[in-house]
């Protein structure tokens, strides 16, 4: 080890993020239900736009993402000047942490929150502070209690990953209003499109100076491979992020595909409907074979088992059937498996495997 070269404080304390597995040794076909990807894929219009962009690969992309920001603004009724795009919403959350927190500061996340949050906090030298949830649901009271003089940012996903639960628009507004001055509330809206009647916090951004909403093209738009997401927030915050982001942080094929995707509202609507239908079906099948879960507002279900040992055996059983789901030990949920909602065939395969496992386990 080179003693003269030391990473910045906090960096050696980071446990690297592990993505959901995508293969099983010795198996060609797997049913991947471990990363909340869209089983229907992106809009054909997004694929066409991506392919068309291949004829202009020698050109730098638009540094201001103007065309995409205008499309997002039109479709969702937002203001283009309050939008900034990034290489996935992970990048825009990282930019917020970089711009608004540093050494000695605290960033709050919840006990079953997204694993990237403590990583992003430590990456800027800040201290992640974990607060309790209430029955696997974000608890605004615990968040407010944890706020101190060093608190700079509160990071919550709503709906949350991996619980699938959410707080209401009213609860989010009350939380935003009750936070101490100078604390930024980031509402990570990666799964907003799957929730009924929730704007992800867009209207909250219009009325609060301390709220930013982030969204992604990785989930309902089916473009996880292209790395594109965005933040919607007050103009001064967006301007701060614009100063520190790389000018060409999003590639031109990604921008083109995302614009076509967001304009294809019919495809997004179909994906939302199919997800809702099969999410309901799957939760009922789980219930029938004795596996409880909380009502989910996202494109996955958090299945609860008797103990960690059963989880481990169930995971192995599913793997033997070529099915990959996500273990939850790192999310402080050792009795749970997170299962992405597949298409009809995927949900049926999963349900019949779980049914068989539970029948043999009795
Ligand atoms: C999947 C996910 C994201 C999206 O990340 P990208 O970088 O946009 O792919 C963000 N937040 C949460 C909670 C997620 O589950």
Image (tube, rainbow, N blue to C red):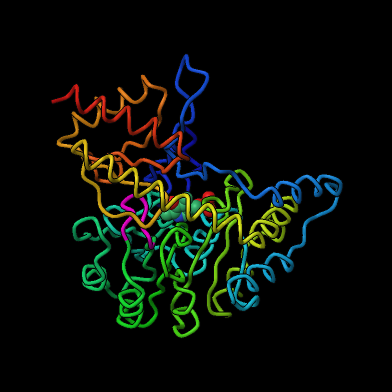
Task: Say which quarter of the image contains residue 297.
Answer: bottom left
Residue 3 visible to the viewer: yes
Count of numbered badges drawn on the protein: 0
Q: Magenta part of the protein: which range?
A: 158-165
Task: Say which quarter of the image contains residue 238.
Answer: bottom right
Q: Quadrant of the C terminus?
A: top left
* Residue at 81% from the left image edge and 48% from the top image edge: 52
Q: Nearer the viewer, residue 83 or 262?
A: 262
Main SS category, magenta section:
loop
User: Residue 160: within the magenta?
Assistant: yes
Q: Position of residue 34 (x, y in %)?
A: 42, 37
Q: Residue furthest bottom?
A: 207
* Residue at 42% from the left image edge and 67% from the top image edge: 187
| Looking at the image, residue 182 lies above or below residue 6 | below
Q: Position of residue 225 (x, y in %)?
A: 61, 43
Q: Position of residue 184 (x, y in %)?
A: 41, 74
Q: Position of residue 268 (x, y in %)?
A: 57, 57
Instruction: Give the side of residue 12 with respect to residue 265, left or right.
Output: left
| Looking at the image, residue 46 lies above or below residue 22 | below
User: Residue 1: within the magenta?
Assistant: no
* Residue at 36% from the left image edge and 37% from the top image edge: 326
Q: Nearer the viewer, residue 342 or 54?
A: 342
Instruction: Give the side of residue 262 with respect to residue 284, left or right.
Output: right
| Looking at the image, residue 213 lies above or below residue 161 | below
Q: Residue furthest top?
A: 26
Q: Nearer the viewer, residue 277 or 357?
A: 277
Residue 8 visible to the viewer: no
* Residue at 48% from the left image edge and 55% from the top image edge: 273
């Amino acid at each position: 080890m080179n003693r003269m070269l030391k990473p910045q404080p906090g960096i050696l304390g980071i446990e690297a993020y592990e993505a959901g597995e995508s293969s099983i040794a010795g198996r060609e076909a797997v049913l991947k239900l471990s990363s909340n990807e869209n089983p229907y894929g992106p809009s054909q219009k997004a694929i066409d736009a991506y392919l068309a962009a291949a004829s202009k690969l020698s050109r730098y992309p638009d540094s201001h993402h103007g065309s995409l920001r205008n499309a997002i603004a039109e479709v969702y009724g937002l203001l283009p000047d309050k939008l900034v795009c990034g290489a996935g919403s992970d990048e825009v959350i990282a930019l917020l942490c970089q711009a608004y927190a540093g050494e000695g500061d605290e960033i709050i996340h919840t006990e079953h929150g997204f694993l990237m949050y403590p990583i992003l906090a430590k990456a800027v030298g800040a201290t992640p502070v974990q607060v309790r949830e209430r029955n696997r649901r974000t608890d605004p009271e615990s968040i407010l209690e944890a706020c101190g003089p060093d608190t700079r940012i509160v990071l919550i996903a709503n709906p949350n990953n991996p619980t699938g639960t959410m707080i209401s628009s009213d609860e989010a507004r009350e939380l935003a209003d009750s936070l101490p001055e100078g604390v930024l509330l980031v509402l990570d809206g990666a799964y907003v499109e799957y929730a009924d009647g929730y704007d992800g916090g867009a209207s909250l951004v219009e009325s609060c100076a301390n709220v930013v909403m982030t969204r992604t093209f990785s989930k309902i738009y089916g473009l996880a491979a292209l790395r594109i997401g965005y933040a919607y927030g007050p103009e001064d915050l967006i301007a701060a992020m614009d100063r520190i982001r790389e000018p060409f942080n999003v590639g031109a094929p990604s921008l083109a595909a995302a614009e076509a995707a967001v304009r294809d509202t019919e495809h997004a609507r179909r994906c939302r409907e199919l997800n809702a239908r099969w999410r309901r079906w799957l939760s009922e099948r789980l219930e029938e074979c004795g596996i409880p879960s909380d009502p989910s507002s996202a494109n996955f279900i958090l299945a609860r088992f008797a103990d960690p040992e059963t989880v481990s055996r169930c995971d192995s059983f599913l793997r033997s059937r070529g099915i990959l789901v996500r273990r939850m030990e790192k999310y402080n949920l050792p009795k749970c498996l997170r299962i992405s909602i597949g298409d009809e065939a995927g949900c049926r395969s999963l349900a019949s495997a779980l049914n068989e496992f539970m029948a043999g386990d009795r």
